[in-house]
Structures are given as structure tokens and as C-alpha cells.
Image (tube, helix red, strand yellow):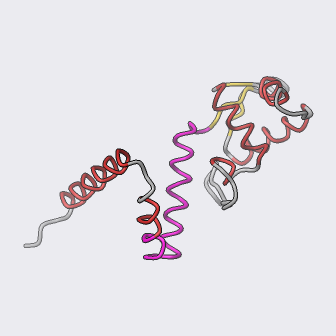
Amino acid sequence: MRKPGSVRIFKLDGRGVGRVLGSLETEVMEEVWRQRETTIRRVWEAIRRRRRLSFNTVMTVMNRLATKGFLIRRGPSGRYRFQARESREVFLAGVSRAIATGLVKDFGDYAVAQFVAALREVDPAKLEALRQTVAETRIGSSARKPSAR
């Protein structure tokens, strides 16, 4: 059994959350994150300003996202209120970690080399913050190692 809210696919041609969710699922999740706690009607009204969509379609998607573990559904039937199981930031961090871990596990040094190559395109300030994080991680892991006697 997989963890609720875990991602099973990654689309190379997608963008952002759309790499791991369908296009309508992405729109719904973005709207739920924006509204924090909401109803099907409020999400439907927000999305239908951008495109034509039936209420039942949004209801189906939101109920499926709840079944998959991405949304929490509360309240009596017909008056459900929904909220995201995780913040957008926590969701993206978890997805990123799962993808990176899977790539390193499957492709080893090839994946690591590509991560390093991708870092050449990162803003220098962000790269410096990453260097500090790596240094802190090294210090923390060496402090946990038992001393040899």
C-alpha cells in the first residue's frame, strides 16, 4: 500500500505540480492551496472563470484527490469542506525528494553528475545557500558518527 498523497508518475513534459498530477487535478490543488479550506462550489466557481467546466467534473476530481490522500474531506455528505493534506511547499519538497532519491537509486553517479550540471544554471545566491546546507549536513553527520577506539 502506498502512502496517502504519494505520487506515482512524473511527466517530463509537464511544468510544476503538473509534472505529477493531471492538468485539472493541478488546477484544483492550486485553488485549494490558495483558499486553504474550501468547498467544491468555491473551487468550481474559481476555475470556471478561466474555462468552461461542469460542477460534477470538479466534484469528481476533488473526491478522487481526497481518496488518493491529497485532500482532506470533512463534514456531512453534501456539505463537505476540503483542505490540502500538506501545504504546497511541503508537497513540492516531498515530491522533489522522492524523485531525486529515485533517480540516484536507479542511475547512481549519472544522476548525481546531472544534478551538479544543473546547478551551473542556478542563481549564485541560491547556490551559496546550498553550499552552507551541505556543509551543515556534513558537520551534523560527522558529529553523529561513533568514535573509533
Image-based side of 31 in relation to 146, left or right: right
Relative to 144, 45 lies left or right: right
Quarter-wise, where is residue 53 in the image?
A: top right
Q: Which of 80 and 10 is in front in this view?
A: 10
Image x and y of residue 79, in percent: 81, 23
Specify the quadrant that holds the N terminus. Answer: bottom right
Residue sitting at 61 percent across and 54 percent down?
3
Seen at 35% across and 51% down, the residue is 127
Please name the predominant secondary structure of the magenta segment in the image: helix
Give x and y (percent) for residue 55: 90, 31
In screen coordinates, is 61 left or right of 91? right
44 up-or-down from 143: above or below:
above
Left or right: residue 147 compared with residue 135: left
Residue 122 within the segment the image draws in magenta: no
Query: Hey, which quadrant is residue 125 in on the image?
Result: top left
Please give the count of numbered marks on the rendered protein. Answer: 0
Query: Considering only vertical position in the picture, is 16 above or below 101?
Result: above
Q: What segment is highlighted magenta in the picture?
A: 85-113
Relative vertical location of residue 10 with respect to residue 27 in this rendering, above or below: below
Q: Residue at x 7, y 73 (%)?
A: 149
Asked whether residue 99 is drawn in magenta, I would say yes
Q: Position of residue 87 (x, y in %)?
A: 56, 36
Give the residue at x 67% y 45%: 69
Residue 121, image x, y percentages: 45, 56
Front residue (pair 114, 93): 114
In terms of depth relative to the viewer, which is nearer, 125 or 75? 125
